Image (tube, coloured by chain):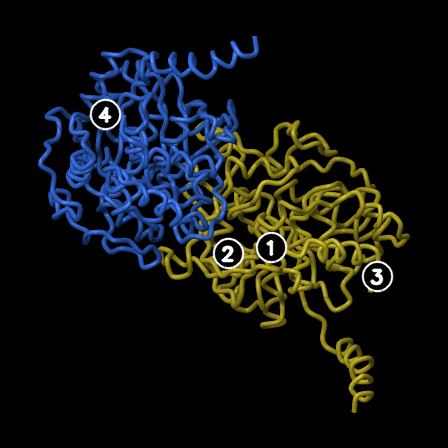
Chain colours: A yellow, B blue
Amino acid sequence: MKSVAKILFLFLVPILALAAPRRKVIIDQDAFGPGGPNLQPILMVLQSPDVEVLGITVESGDGWQKENVAHTLRMLELIGRPEIPVVPGATFPLVNSAEATKRWEARHGKLFYKGAWTEEWSKEVLVRRPEPHGPEVVPPLIEGDPALKPAAETAAEFLVRQVRRYPGEVSILAMGPMTNLALASRLDDGFAAGAKELVFMGGSFNPRPADNAFALEYVYTPRLEFNFRWDPEAASAVLRSPWRRIVQVPVDPSTRTLFRPGMIQAVAAATTPVARYVAAHVESFPLWDEIAAAVWLEPALATRRERVAVDVDTAADGAGYGNTLSWAPGRGPGLGEPVVEVVFEVDVAGLEALVVERLTRAGP
Amino acid sequence: MKSVAKILFLFLVPILALAAPRRKVIIDQDAFGPGGPNLQPILMVLQSPDVEVLGITVESGDGWQKENVAHTLRMLELIGRPEIPVVPGATFPLVNSAEATKRWEARHGKLFYKGAWTEEWSKEVLVRRPEPHGPEVVPPLIEGDPALKPAAETAAEFLVRQVRRYPGEVSILAMGPMTNLALASRLDDGFAAGAKELVFMGGSFNPRPADNAFALEYVYTPRLEFNFRWDPEAASAVLRSPWRRIVQVPVDPSTRTLFRPGMIQAVAAATTPVARYVAAHVESFPLWDEIAAAVWLEPALATRRERVAVDVDTAADGAGYGNTLSWAPGRGPGLGEPVVEVVFEVDVAGLEALVVERLTRAGP
């Protein structure tokens, strides 16, 4: 009996796993690249054998949508995955704007980071980025311009269509501002409830200080995080939609993480197209979005999850515009704020190992 | 030379210290007692030999002003310090109200703590308190009712008069909501600039979790602190006044502190009237206000101070009403937010030793 069990474990379980349908996911991302922190998490998911990526929907955030789409297409081209749809989404947030943000800053003080609205790059965070430019401009890409073309559909339409096609099966892995998801929710009242789950990176609760410059932001504004702040109304609308399940990865678990030089070396030691692409461009940012991808791929990497009622401050004139709001479950105002699973801590060694493993393995 | 230096150190320095004029202070406090955390810090200052307490000005906050005044008078009576003026101040905040707070809670969720507006005491924080009541009611005091009478003046008038009398000499040690100080600032444009300094307990930046129930508040609302929240407009007005120096003690350094049972035992072992009074009533609260008193008495107990631009969110309809706002110096909106010295960490052992020493020593 013992050896039968062993045979079952060694052979049958992997066979069953391979036979099981792959987990369907749509990745929604402000895919500003190639060295930024947005593209590696997409690659982690693309490299996972048990996952079917239905498409990548793209919005503005760290960079403008058009440029983000170009980076994503070029990446897929270089790694040999041209079959993955790249679907252009929102260029502008629902309500928020560059001008409103300037007026807000004059009243309430400078934001630490403004993504595509950045007028000049902060001296505190050294980055290799093209000079700030308008939404219609796609400067020449340092990784080369793509020949691949984006999908003709809009991101919101694509999201609605795929969720209707596979009711209860599609996970939404959202790692940028939630404009596309808010539009999908308003296009189709059944969108959120029709998806399997929403797993997103966004928001900030009580992040701990870190020894890197990125966490300086949280010293003054611990509740402020860029994805929420770029489009607060979208984030609130998406949170209040009737999802079956929401998993939130705020900045909290990221402050002790970094794409460390040792990880870059480990990736550079591999010779696959994915590893070559990453090694050529990756910079040492905190693993903000990698954590979101990782806890969706390997839920056990989240070592502390808590159920918290969450919303976003949408009072545009207030000092707290875009801040994460939270309550103990049942203590909120009852305006639709959902109880979400918030990931507060992760297994950092396990996370780093998964990142390196996915970015160095052979493609599926 | 060595022995001469020793003699100087052992005898002359203490003699000089005794000969030096005592440091003048007005204590402003929502002196809800006797077991609450508000009266011990007053006693610490009263028991300090190098200090002259010009008076104690009282406002509403944890409890209503009338009841707070009665507790303060009874304490002075029991410890034999009837010469200290107790000056009744504001009953209500400048703008905020119980009704506005109820409406705010219906919109934005329940506050963790509402002081004198509490409708029922939280089950999470066990307290021995009279049932919630209105501002005109002074229930029978468990420590006995005072025969001493309060000063006839108002707190704001007293503050203005004393600061004019001793220009540049009076420290204001404020440990409750800042309504009285805002009134004084508006009564006399020269009030803030005429004082030596403002040292206050209030606000919250990035408090660390603690293993006591009091810190639960900061899990959901890390920028929310009661003194600011009771009267946000007063706190902002006071901060924006032209003080020579502001030292802020937020909740941040308090989360690792508690009036521990060992400290209560140490106080109970003494037989002075002060020790007897404290031992009979004190409860194990975090040392919120004791820290403010301590860093004014012994500045070296503050082990980390940082210069931060600070203000208070006064958007009454917003989710962040009363929240602490902060910026790196020079990065604020320029609306008068001052750069203050914020005490982020204290020497906890030294703090506890000072608390016990002041509460057990013979009176001055």
Q: Residue at x 64, y 56 (%)?
A: A346
Q: Residue at x 13, y 24 (%)?
A: B153
Instruction: Give the mark, 1 or 2, whose residue is nearer the N terminus.
Output: 2
- Residue A318 visible here: no
How far apart are the alpha carbons under marks 3 and 1? 29 Å
Front position among marks 3 and 4: 4
Report the amino acid beneath label 2.
Answer: Val
Q: In the rendered view, would you say A1 is above or below B63?
A: below
Report the amino acid beneath label 4.
Answer: Leu
Chain hosting mark 2: A
- Residue indicated by mark 4: B183
Q: Residue furthest toward the right?
A: A271
Chain hosting mark 4: B
Q: Residue A33 has which mark? A: none
Q: Residue A238 has which mark? A: 2
- Of residue B248 and residue A152, the one placed in the foreground of this image is B248
Q: Secondary structure at mark 4?
A: helix
Q: In the rendered view, would you say B124 is above or below A225?
A: below
Q: Is residue A270 left or right of A54 when viewed as pictured?
A: right
Q: Secondary structure at mark 3?
A: loop
How far apart are the alpha carbons under marks 2 and 4? 44 Å
Residues tagged by mark 3 and mark 4 found on one chain of the structure: no
- Residue B284 visible here: yes
Report the amino acid beneath label 3.
Answer: Gly
Give percent across and percent down for residue B51: 31, 22
Chain hosting mark 3: A
- Residue indicated by mark 1: A345
Give percent across and percent down for residue A165: 62, 71
